[in-house]
Amino acid sequence: MNKFVFILLVASGLSGCVSNEAVQTVQTDDETKSCPALKVELSQLGVKFDDVKDDSGVTGKNVGLALVFWPGIIVNEVRSNKNQDSIDARINHLSSIYNRKCLDEKADNNSIGQLSDRLHELKKMHEQGLITEDEYEKVRQRTLDDL
């Protein structure tokens, strides 16, 4: 009976250990991911970060380990911190790629839209006779050269 209780306590202590959920910061296909794919992975990483954060501190696993094998608490905390750090590094890496690829792309689209609006307004001014043909062509060409 004593062996059974001991085995049960050891098994419950070992099952209480935090699993290794560390992620690789940089992956080979990161730069080729689309903006929507980056957003999806970032949101999944956010959920995963919250999950591994829940493994730290006063948890059922740590309380169980305190009863059976108190040094296991230190192992759990170290592993939990490594998991959090690796996920945080991956989030920072993907956020950098997202900002560079996706936010710059939106800024470029906005500037093209502004250019289009400016050219339409210029054409309307010419059609209304507010500016001459030469003025229209000069300002139009200058606007296009600013690209």
Image (spheres, rainbow, N blue to C red):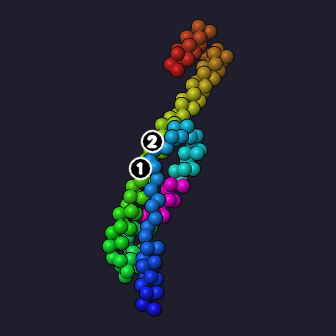
The picture quadrant where one finds residue 117 is top right
Task: Report the label total.
Answer: 2
Q: Nearer the viewer, mark 1 or mark 2?
A: 1
Q: Which residue is mark 2?
A: 96
Q: Position of residue 72 (x, y in %)?
A: 36, 72
Image-based side of 78 in relation to 106, left or right: left
Q: Is residue 47 magenta?
A: yes
Find the distance from the CA under tag 1 to the CA under tag 2.
11 Å
How far from the left and from the top, in percent, is residue 71? 32, 73
Task: Report the amino acid beneath label 1.
Answer: Ala
Predominant SS along the magenta part: helix
Nearer to us in this view, 12 or 44:
12
Task: State the extent of the magenta-drawn residues as a range.
Answer: 44-53
The image shows residue 54 at horizontal and vertical percentages of 44, 67
- Quarter holding the N terminus? bottom left
Q: How many other residues sit within 10 Å of disc 2, few (<14), some (14-19) or many (≥20)?
A: few
Residue wearing tag 1: 89
Q: Is residue 83 above or below residue 1?
A: above
**Please, what secondary structure does the residue beneath circle 1 have?**
helix
Quadrant in the rendering for residue 133:
top right
